[in-house]
Image: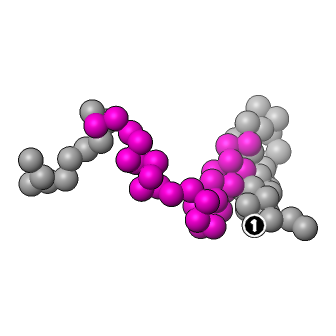
Amino acid sequence: MITRKQFAAFLGFAFVAAWIGFNFGYAILCLAGAAAFYVAAAVLDGEVDLAEFQARLPASERRKAPGAD
């Protein structure tokens, strides 16, 4: 059975492929679209925790909230 992430990746691929009008030079956009939809589906399924990912960033790359000195 196809998973939600695989289906989302397929939809992303098909969407970008139709959008670029089957131009071979932009075929890499199909892969980027599929990857973006795959990641979005993973986030929606709860497999990717964005807060945990943000906590792994070095402190120098994180922005401080206004007023949080």
- How far across and down, in percent of the image, does residue 3 sit? 80, 65
Amino acid type, callout 1: Arg
Q: Nearer the viewer, residue 21 or 49?
A: 49
| Residue that appears at 68% across and 47% down | 35
The answer, for residue 11, to whether it is visible in the render is no
- Image quadrant where residue 23 sits: top right
Q: Quickly name the residue at label 1.
A: 4
Instruction: Specify the quadrant that holds the N terminus.
Output: bottom right
| Residue that appears at 63% across and 67% down | 45
Read off the magenta span.
31-59
* Magenta span contains residue 45: yes
Q: Is residue 11 left or right of residue 57?
A: right
Question: Which residue sits furthest right?
Answer: 1
- How far across and down, in percent of the image, does residue 8 sit? 73, 62
* Magenta span contains residue 49: yes
| Residue that appears at 38% across and 47% down | 55
Q: Nearer the viewer, residue 17 or 55?
A: 55
Q: Is residue 42 left or right of residue 9?
A: left
